[in-house]
Amino acid sequence: MSTKLYLVRLYRGYRFPEQAFSWRRTAHPPIIACFHARELADVYVATHLPLWQNPFDSYALYVRQSYGIEPWREDEDIPKEPERVVAWVDFLAALSQLNLPEPPMPPNDDEDEVQACLKRWWDETELTNEQREALWRLIDPKPYRIDEVELEGTP
Amino acid sequence: MIVYLVQKLHWEYNDNWFEREGDEPVKAFESRDDALLWAELLEDEARRELEKGEGVGFSVNPLRVFGGTERATSLTYDELWEKLDEAGLLTPPPTDDLYEQAWWRALWPRITPVQRDWLWSLLDGVQFYEVIETELEETK
């Protein structure tokens, strides 16, 4: 007899692989929880946001590609993933709705600058846990992965 | 309750060699021994595929494609050479070095299954499956 298990993993950042030319998520996210039901894994992810982790503590590329925040959506040179992209102004509006302080406008559209600006803002602003949680909820995708696997040997 | 996960380790070509790039759980077991046995069977299967050149078309020298001795094994190049020499696997020797595809292809048809498994055991940096343990939350 077999049954299914759901494994929750947490990515702790990004890395630039040796000899490759793109940033990637850490290759071996540790398993932090394991459940019999998918719903429980989903609840775990929703209620265990990594509040200690600066969501912008990676490289600017991910401000757009992974965190879905696009400061200058009108720039047609930047490839778009419309379903994941949030314009800078929309991001600010969402922060405002949550009563979160507004980050300073990056000095230019260089991705490194945008990332550095957001990272510094998170580090230097004394956000409460509630604010951190609210901010993490804006960010998609979450730094989690849920894998399904069959468990053998259940009597 | 502890469960034992068999994970497939993905390797990705980085324009020079294959490097580990992520993992994927394949099956979980209540028994560690069952998990180890399952992983061993899958590991053998993956090695045979590499030897046959699945997806590549020729038998691939693991030293060549997994980043040389510094990544494919914990042995130094000289230690590996010595061990292969002692086992009679360097007759005839490679023209230049152990990374030669021609040497590997000439070696493979005459290698015994025991020698083959022994050689793979030296390449401890090249692994296709692993077993890890994790705790199942008591929520059922």
Image (cartoon, coloured by chain):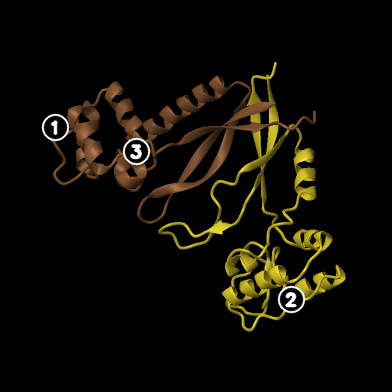
Chain colours: A yellow, B brown
SS state under label 1? loop
Q: Where is mark 1, residue-wise?
A: B91
**Of callouts 3 and 1, the N-terminal one:** 3
Q: Which quadrant of the figure contains the C terminus of chain A?
A: top right
The answer to which image quadrant residue A130 occupies is bottom right
Q: Position of residue B84 (x, y in %)?
A: 22, 32
Q: Residue at x 31, y 27 (%)?
A: B118
Q: Amino acid at mark 2?
A: Pro
Question: Can residue B103 be seen at all in this image of the molecule?
Answer: yes
SS state under label 2? loop
Q: Where is mark 3, residue-wise?
A: B53
- Pointer 3: residues within 10 angstroms few (<14), some, or many (20+)? some
Q: Residue at x 85, y 67 (%)?
A: A98
Q: Is residue A142 above or below residue B55?
A: below
What chain does badge 3 belong to?
A: B
Q: Amino acid at mark 1?
A: Thr
Q: Where is mark 2, residue-wise?
A: A103
Structural distance between the alpha carbons of marks 3 and 2: 53 Å
SS state under label 3? loop
